[in-house]
Image: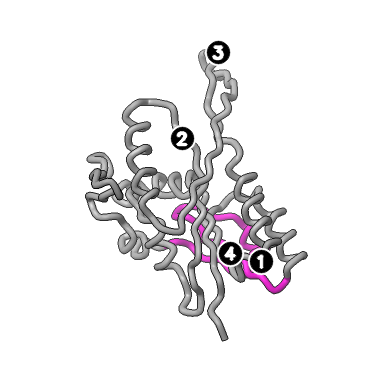
Amino acid sequence: MSNERTIGYIDGFNLYFGLKTNNWKRYYWLNLQALMQNLLKPEQDLIHIKYFTTRVSSPPSQVKRQGTYIEALETLKDFSIYYGHFQPNTKTCKKCGDIQDVPNEKMTDVNIAVEMLTDAFENKFDTALLISADSDLVGMIKSIIRLFPEKKIVVIFPPARYSVALNTVAKGSFTIGRKKLAKSVFPDSVTKADGFILNKPDRWK
């Protein structure tokens, strides 16, 4: 029998904030292809990874770090990036009454749902590995399982993240461990196809 065609779907900010909660900055410089390979079972063949994120607009130092990381990710084969956007939400401070626009990431869950549903309909995978703890994706998983009961959807929770709802509907789930992360970090310098060298940000060392 042939191995299971497997596609990885990664909720970028969900993974990032899981790492941030644990103060695991050393793992921000993650080679997501290596991570997915390290999470596979022997019978699974990774054919593509889809990464979902949103570009930050401030402060400049964070913009630069994220830009460098995205460029490093763009060196990976069979790897696609999908972008959402930030929408300002007005919030009022209960103590001082100050009104501020707080950015709220939008579109990531929709983009994941569209890509995974499309791939299921086009029969591009046997198994989908979803790195996220966003319960908004429950409806999408239910639909795929109902329409394509032979397909497997496994939810992989980022560190410090968990969803009872996702765990209930998925055909399997587990949490990314620290050892898997440690084995999946880019080298400190990544060379692009044009020879330009990308260096791991100092704050992530």
Q: Report crowding for label 3: few under 14, some 14 to 19, many 20 or more residues within 10 A (C-alpha).
A: few
Earlier sequence position, callout 4 versus callout 3: 3
In the rendered structure, find residue 149 and report the number of the disc placed on it.
none
Identify the residue shown where x is 43% and y is 46%: 16
Which residue range is magenta in the image? 149-176
Earlier sequence position, callout 4 versus callout 2: 2
Identify the residue shown where x is 24% and y is 55%: 187
Viewer-side residue, 205 vs 175: 205
Q: Secondary structure at mark 2?
A: loop
Callouts 4 and 3 close, C-beta under 8 Å: no
Q: Position of residue 64 (x, y in %)?
A: 33, 33
Viewer-side residue, 122 vs 35: 122
Q: CA distance from mark 3 to mark 2?
A: 30 Å
Earlier sequence position, callout 3 versus callout 1: 3
The answer to whether residue 177 is left or right of residue 4 is: left
Vertical placement of residue 25 versus 175, above or below: above
Disc 2 target residue: 55
Earlier sequence position, callout 1 versus callout 2: 2
* Residue 175 belongs to magenta span: yes
**Residue 181 is drawn in which quadrant?**
bottom left
Q: Nearer the viewer, mark 1 or mark 2?
A: 1
Disc 1 target residue: 123
